[in-house]
Image (spheres, rainbow, N blue to C red):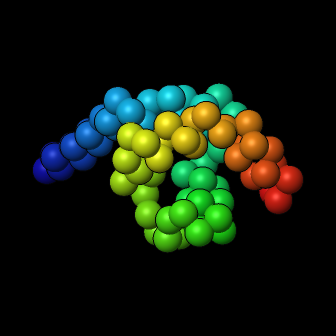
Amino acid sequence: MPTPLDPEPAPAPAHLRPVLDLMARDGISEAQIQSVMASYGYMTPDTPITAYDEEFAGWVASSWDQIRDYIRSIS
């Protein structure tokens, strides 16, 4: 008997696209971002990226080089 297809995930809000594009480009996972944001004290470790508001997502995108380099230094 056929099973229903899993629904497609909802597209990410437009304000997250720059962050998601940078993550994809540099091979950084959501778990890595969550861990770093928790270590900075900005978010809890289980806060998904989709919960980031426009201002915070903008900060992440504008600080990307430092965030990426920190993740690479601890990986």
Q: Residue at x 60, y 53 (%)?
A: 33
Q: Residue at x 36, y 54 (%)?
A: 51
- Please, is residue 30 above or below residue 60 in the view? below
Q: Residue at x 16, y 46 (%)?
A: 4
Q: Quadrant of the C terminus?
A: bottom right
Q: Is residue 60 left or right of residue 57?
A: right
Quarter of the rendering containing residue 63: top right
Q: Is residue 27 left or right of residue 6?
A: right
Outermost right residue: 73
User: Residue 11: where, in percent of width, then height?
Assistant: 30, 35
User: Residue 27: where, in percent of width, then height?
Assistant: 67, 38
Quarter of the rendering containing residue 28: top right
Q: Residue at x 82, y 59 (%)?
A: 74
- Please, is residue 50 above or below residue 47 in the view? above
Quarter of the rendering containing residue 39: bottom right
The reply to whether residue 28 is visible in this rendering is yes
User: Residue 65: where, in percent of width, then height?
Assistant: 74, 36
User: Residue 40: where, in percent of width, then height?
Assistant: 65, 64
> Which residue is nearer to you in this view: 63 or 26?
63
